[in-house]
Amino acid sequence: MNACLDSETYAKLAETWREIPEARRLLDERPTLQGRELDLEALARLPKGTLGHEFVRYFRDNGIEPFITTFPVASDVDYLSKRYRETHDLFHLITGYGTDEPGEMELQAFVLGNLGVRQAVLILAYSVPRQLKRSGFKDFKAYLGRLRAAYSRGRHSRELLSVSYEKLWEQPVSTLTDLLCAPA
């Protein structure tokens, strides 16, 4: 679904990335963050607070595994689609948005502002009636305010998809948040 909805978005990103040395290197080398390529035990041994350690903790705390796909990567668009899926959980760590439903929606709003992916629009459109049904209009204005703030934060942050996370495992998450994200 991600690749189908956002192939145009990824094509535009690839075109832009080809003009930026670090991003072009990602497209040429196509590093992966797939579960079978990661040494989770080595990452877990890194100091607490580092991206690698917190990445493994995130998976363990949420009872999930890193993303694995058999989707063929034949083009830059394919790679960016795969890369987006692989980095989703890292985005939770970097932005600080939770994995509960409100946190996930804030991350989707952030990603919409940061990358412009259509998939986020679809997910957010689904969440609005659910939120209304759950809490009524009482908390709805605050909910929309959080989504609006997350979208704005995404617009004013560095494009998170183009970051070489594979080289940053030993960096503190807090430092990366300060470097990559606009203030919350």
Image (spheres, helix red, strand yellow):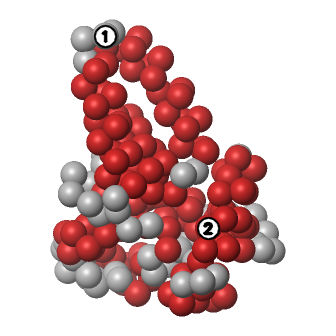
* Residue displayed at 59% across by 77% down: 17
Question: In the picture provided, is 61 more to the left or to the right than 27?
Answer: left
Q: Which residue is mark 1?
A: 137
Quarter location, residue 67 = bottom right
* Label 2: few (<14), some (14–19) or many (≥20) C-alpha neighbours in 10 Å: some
Answer few, some or many: residues within 10 Å of disc 1's Cα (few below 14, many 20 plus, some between 14 and 19): few
The answer to whether any part of residue 130 appears in the image is yes
Q: Quadrant of residue 47?
A: bottom left
Indicate which disc, 2 or 1, sits on the residue closer to the N terminus. 2
> SS of the residue at dot 1?
loop
Q: Is residue 28 left or right of residue 152?
A: right
In the rendered image, residue 68, in percent from the top left (x then y), is placed at: 62, 64
| Residue drawn where x is 40% and y is 64% of the image | 90
Say which amino acid is labelled 1: Phe
Residue at x 79%, y 69% (from the top left corner) = 72
Q: What amino acid is at disc 2?
A: Leu
Question: As displayed, is residue 120 above or below residue 139?
Answer: below
Figure check: 45 above or below 142: below
Placement of 10 over or under 38, stated as above or below: above
Q: Label for residue 13?
A: 2
| In-front residue for pair 169/62 | 169
In this rendering, does residue 30 appear at all?
Answer: no
* x, y percent for residue 69: 67, 63
Q: Position of residue 51 (x, y in %)?
A: 30, 74
Q: For the image shown, how many numbered marks are present on the structure? A: 2
